[in-house]
């Protein structure tokens, strides 16, 4: 397997743990798990800039992080996460349009 697969799998599990923590009304634990997933997805994106799927997954995790922050009333944090997700998705759309 590629060396990135364990990190990618870990990010997925951390996102799911965050979802469970939200369901159990534990936003602090949800944030810890999701912040770690964001860090892993960011690192994967930096190390693999040509991987469209890594970029898409990173954008989705940023979106999820923004939603969690918004639900906690952390509007500035939510805006930063959503802005980062939008910028990344805009880049992906541009790249898709440039590819024949």
Image: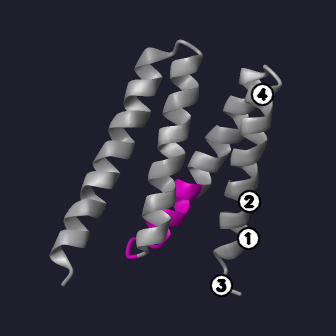
Q: Position of residue 28 (x, y in %)?
A: 73, 23
Residue at the image point whose x is 20% and y is 63% from the top: 94
What separation in Å lies between label 4 and label 1 (alpha carbons)?
A: 26 Å
Choose the circle earlier in sequence order: 2 or 3: 3
Boundaries of the magenta span: 41-50
SS for dot 3: loop
Camera-near label (4 vs 1) is 4
Residue at the image point whose x is 51% and y is 20% from the top: 70
Viewer-proximal residue among 42 and 62: 62
30 up-or-down from 72: above or below? below
Determine which residue is flagged by label 2: 10
What separation in Å lies between label 2 and label 4 (alpha carbons)?
A: 20 Å
The quarter of the picture where the C terminus appears is: bottom left
The answer to the question of whether label 2 and label 4 lie on touching residues, with beta carbons closer than 8 A, is: no
Classified by dominant secondary structure, the portion drawn in magenta counts as helix
Q: Position of residue 56 (x, y in %)?
A: 44, 60
Determine which residue is flagged by label 4: 23
Determine which residue is flagged by label 1: 6
What separation in Å lies between label 4 and label 3 (alpha carbons)?
A: 33 Å
81 falls in the magenta region: no
What separation in Å lies between label 2 and label 3 (alpha carbons)?
A: 14 Å
12 up-or-down from 5: above or below? above
The answer to the question of whether label 4 and label 3 lie on touching residues, with beta carbons closer than 8 A, is: no
SS for dot 2: helix
Residue at the image point whose x is 30% and y is 62% from the top: 92
Residue furthest out toward the right: 24
Q: How is the image coloured?
A: one colour
Choose the circle earlier in sequence order: 4 or 1: 1
Residue at the image point whose x is 73% and y is 38% from the top: 18
Q: How many marks?
A: 4
Determine the image quadrant of residue 33. top right
């Amino acid at each position: 397997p590629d060396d990135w697969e364990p990190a990618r799998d870990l990010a997925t599990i951390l996102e799911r743990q965050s979802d469970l923590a939200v369901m159990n009304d534990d936003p602090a634990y949800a944030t810890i798990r999701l912040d770690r997933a964001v860090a892993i997805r960011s690192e994967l994106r930096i190390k693999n800039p040509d991987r469209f799927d890594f970029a898409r997954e990173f954008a989705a995790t940023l979106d999820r992080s923004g939603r969690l922050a918004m639900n906690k009333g952390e509007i500035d944090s939510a805006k930063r996460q959503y802005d980062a997700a939008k910028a990344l998705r805009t880049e992906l759309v541009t790249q898709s349009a440039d590819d024949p």
